[in-house]
Image: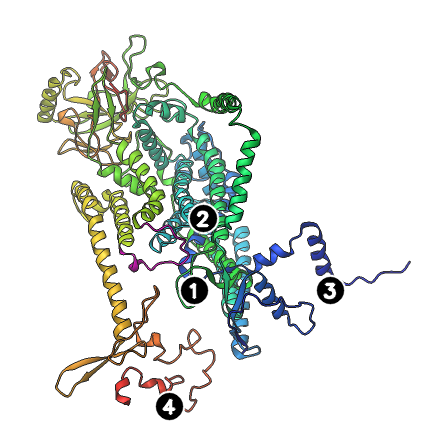
Amino acid sequence: MSTKTEQHAPQDREPLDIHDPRLSRFDIVTEGARRDDIEIVHYEEQVVPGSKAERRLTRTVAAMFLLTGLAATAFLVVYIWWPWEYEPGRGGDKWYTPLLGLTLGIALLGIGFGILTWGKKLLPKEVSIQDRHDGPGSAEDRKITGETMLYLADEMGVRRRPLLGVSLVAGLLPVGAVAAAPLVGGLISNPHKNNQMFTTGFAPQDGKKIRLVREDGRPIRPADVSAGGQLTVFPGIEHGVSNKHADSPTLLIHLRETDAEKSRQANSRVGHGDYMWGNYAAYSKICTHAGCPASLYEQQTNRLLCPCHQSQFLITDNARPVFGPASRRLPQLPIEVDEDGFFVAKSDYTETVGPDFWERP
Amino acid sequence: MKRRKFDVAAVPGKAAGGVDDRFQVATPLRKLLNKVFPDHWSFLLGEIALFSFVVLLLTGVFLTFFYEPAMTEVVYNGSYAPLRGTPMSAAYASSLDISFDVRGGLIMRQMHHWSALLFMAAIVVHMMRVFFTGAFRKPRETNWIIGSLLFWVGFLAGFTGYSLPDDGLSGTGLRIASGIMLSIPVIGSWVTSSVFGGEFPGEIIISRFFIAHVLLIPGLLVALISAHLGLVFKQKHTQWPGPGRTNENVVGERMFPRYALKQGGFFMVVFGVIALMGGLFQINPIWYFGPYEAWVVSAASQPDWYVMFLDGSTRLMPAWEINIPIGNGYVIPPLFWPTVVLPGILVGLSTLYPFVEARQLKDYRHHNLLQRPRDVPARTAVGAMAVAFYIVLTLSGANDVIADKFHISLNAMTWAGRIGLLFIPPLAYYVTYRICLGLQQHDREVLAHGVETGIIRRLPDGRFEEVHQPLSAGDGHGHGELDYVGWVVPKKMNRLGALGPAIRGFFYPIEKPVEAPVSPGHPPVEPRPEREEIGSGDSRR
């Protein structure tokens, strides 16, 4: 076992003549390291050449590499011949991705651990010391560079000819704005176009009241919702159910008699006396906190919970937020039943739907 | 014509000569080959982030070949039967196609997602390593700032990425993001409307997120990562204190071959683990969530883990709305504080910390030696406080799931989070500070009195005492004269070599140690005779 441990060499030693034929290759490596201020202070073979340990390690590494080859081949076989197209049920295709992962993982781990074993166990261990040289540059160099840069400013003569500097800045400022203008100008979009932040799909069109419809577009009769039940409804207009009217989904709730009474009283306290129709009330489903659909309705307590941040709204008290981060009640949609017996919105929401923002009145 | 003999053996040398003639690389290449790197397991955490980023790039490029960043409505007609005939966005349909109709697409998608999670996790753990060991001190403040920026840019990469499939879950995330933008005072509605191209969700956001996710953000990440690595290279890695290690040198291995081999092997291992996870562990099964519809959400809609702390802060925030009664009235919604102000403060605090600490300690020297966390109790305690803060928020981000699984009231969970956020971090500070002092004290104790041997001796007067093995010759009164040097103090007898050498080999020894007796009845390895009595040094007198 060859072990080389040396003391740190003095800095002022003579460089070695690397053409000396008596030098081994390692001597030249050491000399090269020294020229980079690196001293190899300890260099030790980890395995005795020709020993049982070496043969064993060699076999281990080779086995890992061969395992990689095997696993990679298996990956290809699976990739090409395994049934991969989706079939309902518990078919073999469900094993396609796991098998790919398994074979690919084993292939990569095999080569990884093979290389690691090779590097860590079979290569000689060493301790090298390199100087950092991370102090500041020499005072002289600092001064020279500083003076050069100051001289540069002198040459430009900005101090003597201030007009140049001022006019340059004045000229460049608009150029900066020119770079920003297309980006800002292209992207900017007025949030108050068509009053879009304050209207929903329930706004009457041409004086015609909008029907409340189900997900599939069918209008709703009062008898469709049993007492204590609730239904998500949409404006009965084109694309009313789609994300084009993401602020329109509304919860139609058929309150039980006592709850409805409470709700009506609460309504009249805020001047919404005629918003309910019978025992039916409709509230925006879009949470006033961050805009998730507040969709978990607890029948017994008449609370509506938003699953995103757990704001809770008390439906019988004008959907007032009673817990969680929401600070504003859910807007109520004034509803009635038209001559055909279907629910319609009397008007659009009278409060702003959706998450709060700065200029919300 | 005389045919010249072609000397194969001389080809590499000649080629190398030719290259050096043109590019003068011999000297810089030697310097590179010789560069010394210190070695410690904790220095590999950042590498995991780097390697996962490489996997992200590879798998991400694959995904772009099949993904269609459009919100045009199409009717799904792919292999996944339960969704066939459903109207959905082209983005969601193509994400489903990647999962079901592209051969090997699902494993690529899952590897991409897992490596993103691993990337962020490795960044966080690496950041903790750098923080707790003081590796961010002068001259490395710039790299600390780049590192913290990498976390936030990675955060954006993750968010824009998991919004792309446009499934029910990611649409909910987008909806919340639009709510967060809306909450910004004065400009909120303009920002949201400009980003989304009109009212939420608009028809353009997916293509904008796509170009951000595949070009702008990765470009920024590559630039920041290159600067980060370049600075590590230029400033040389920090090292732990130890024999021969000073502030002015680097003690370790030269980069080639052993260090580089280990790096290469480690990359393959990280890649392999990601492949196993991508194949074996399902992640983000978008086909269960359905297309995004503004009125559908399910309970337990959680974001990826590194976003959960913001979700938690949003849930814990009390409903404090600020009304400004001018004109029609203006509002600062409660959503603004936990989602815009809090991250702002966190970015500021984390980037400025090196300067704050240097100012506090009036320490403006260069530091290339790391510190053990116990030796800097105040910093370690501040770090523990930050970790506690983060953990409370992250747990609160899943408080509905915890409430459900453990049958706890949801409101109680929220209140526990609110109170915990105020009291647990200071508590963590205090406890950590005390632990650090205790560990420091124990180090000094061992240096002064020696290692506990576990041998109890009875004195003639009937007292019992434990025999200690001093670590130095001492002053004759059982007290050593060793100074603490900022590195591990051996505290067990086998750390002093009192037991036999470790047996090499996994299940059975590779080679029997030369000095071990081979006669039957003896164990193959036993302590050398002169070591046997170590620890009861007095008895030999």
Per the picture, the main secondary structure of the magenta-coloured stretch is: loop
Q: For the residue carrying disc 4, how many other residues have a C-alpha within 10 Å: few (<14), some (14-19), or many (20+)?
A: few
Specify the segment rendered in magenta. Answer: B362-377
Amino acid type for the residue under numbered disc 1: Arg
Assess whether mark 2 and mark 4 are in contact (beta carbons under 8 angstroms). Answer: no
Amino acid type for the residue under numbered disc 4: Gly
Tag 2 or tag 1, which sits nearer the N-term?
2
Residue at 36% x, 26% y: name it. B192
Amino acid type for the residue under numbered disc 3: Ala
> Which numbered marker is on residue B9?
3
Q: CA distance from mark 2 to mark 3?
A: 44 Å
Does label 2 lie on the same chain as label 1? Answer: yes
Where residue B166 appears, x then y in whole percent? 40, 34
Where residue A273 appears, x then y in whole percent? 13, 16
Tell me the chain of label 2.
B
Tell me the chain of label 1.
B
Q: For the residue carrying disc 1, how many other residues have a C-alpha within 10 Å: few (<14), some (14-19), or many (20+)?
A: some
At mark 3, the secondary structure is helix
Q: Which residue is mark 2?
A: B111
Tell me the chain of label 3.
B
> Which numbered marker is on residue B245?
1
At mark 2, the secondary structure is helix
Tag 4 or tag 3, which sits nearer the N-term?
3
Q: For the residue carrying disc 2, how many other residues have a C-alpha within 10 Å: few (<14), some (14-19), or many (20+)?
A: many
Q: Nearer the viewer, mark 3 or mark 1?
A: 1
Residue B393, compared with residue B526, is above or below; it is above
Does label 4 lie on the same chain as label 1? Answer: yes
Assess whether mark 4 and mark 3 are in contact (beta carbons under 8 angstroms). Answer: no
The outermost residue toward the top is A207
Q: Which residue is mark 4?
A: B521
Assess whether mark 1 and mark 3 are in contact (beta carbons under 8 angstroms). Answer: no
